[in-house]
Image (spheres, helix red, strand yellow):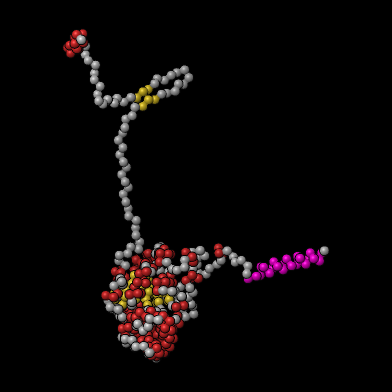
Amino acid sequence: MKAPVALLSFCGLAATSAFVASPFRSAAPAAQRRFEPAKFGFTDQQEFVPWKERDAGARSPLQREGELDPELLNDLFRTAGADRLRETVKPLAGFAAIFRLETLVDLSSVHKQAWSRVADRFMWRQLTEEEVSCSLTMLPERAIMEEFYWTFDWNVAQQAAEVFREEFDNVHTEFLKDLESVPLPSRQGLNGIIQPETVELLETLREGECQVAVVSSLKRDATIKTLDLAGITHVPKALITPEDKHDRDQQALLGAAYKLEAAPERCLVFELTPAGAMAAHEAGMRVVCVIGGYARYELHLADMTISSFADLNALSFKRIFADVDFDPEPALQPLPEPERRRPVRVATKTRVATRGKEKTPKTETKVDVPDFPPRRSPPDEDSPNVGIRRKIVEKV
């Protein structure tokens, strides 16, 4: 009997050790998990992870929500404490700027060459510069069907969009190779990929400690290399690229605000199209549109329209957010006056209890209230009218 008992005990010990070492055992509770602090900014070696994995709280609202919410971000990154004192010294430090890559760097030639190759492959008409500039920030499928009117078949539009993405990557790689041989002053000149007034605005924002983010439709490596060749890699603090997997423009802008740790109500977006202005307003942000592919009257949704970045300065931020009170003070309201009550006289009657043999007299309080109508007083015996009435009664 000892052998089976020993065998059963050995099997139980082995099962227990196997359960402890099994990868399928139940996970530890969420409260015991450790989360690394969120890291902001980007470098060549560090890559951003999706925003859900960056949250440091196990049961925070950002973990439960399926999408980023402007109101949640406003409450999460509301300015308080020493940040208010910093804003008094440097007003730009209280705001954040979010740029489209196409507003900073001129990539219209790359887009036009890629679309030209797509038109040659599908035997479609060639595009004009105005049509290309209107489609810089649009999805390729939407541009093919709604802007170029090449086709109304969704399957054909998807095939053409895939061809455009491949050709765009090839043309953009060739474009960057050609720029490497050009000196930096020429790249930042009037005929370069970035204008001098754009460089001045970015330097002003950097000196004023205004946080800057860039939203790009290019891949992360291509975006960083483009900014590097333009000489402005040190300016942006955050990047939003297709690797972040945001499904629409509104979520991409909110993702940029989350990486900057800025409230959406304090963010200023720079766009080129009316659709981009609408997405910025959906995210609860202010927007400035640069006139290019669209005329000024077509950009009426924007809070401000400019022809170039030379029209902006540090005071432009104050003018755009002039109607917003970021630190409202509660209004002092006077207390209501107490109601004045008139004294009412009421007849009362009190009795005092007897203590032993001594009795206290009863006290009565009575208020004389006149009768209405007043009672007639009894007739006087000495008046002559009383005698006359008696005689009349006797005769009767």
Question: Could you tell whether 384 is left or right of 367 in the image?
Answer: left
Q: Position of residue 351 (x, y in %)?
A: 41, 24
Q: Position of residue 245 (x, y in %)?
A: 46, 75
- Which quadrant is home to the N terminus? bottom right
Q: Is residue 192 visible?
A: no
Q: Is residue 60 magenta?
A: no
Left/right placement of residue 27 relative to residue 11 reads left
Residue for point 45% across, 82% down = 221
Instruction: Pick the residue in front: 141 or 286.
Output: 141
> Which image quarter: residue 301?
bottom left
Query: In this rendering, is residue 270 above or below 77?
Result: below
Q: What is the number of callouts on the image? A: 0
Position of residue 365 measured from the top left corner of the image (x, y, whole percent): 34, 24
Please identify the dominant SS of the magenta region: helix
Foreground pick, 273 / 120: 120
Q: Is residue 18 magenta?
A: yes
Q: Which residue is at 31% across, 32% downward? A: 344
Q: Give the answer, above or below, for where 336 lies relative to 329.
A: above
User: Residue 284's image quarter?
Assistant: bottom left
Left/right placement of residue 388 relative to residue 91 reads left
Residue most extreme to the front? 396
Q: Which residue is found at the position 38% from the left and 69% from the top?
A: 283
Q: Is residue 353 visible?
A: yes
Residue at the spot 33% in from the left edge and 86% down from the top edge: 127
Residue ranking furthest to the right: 1
In which quadrant will I find the C terminus?
top left
Q: Which residues are magenta?
A: 2-23
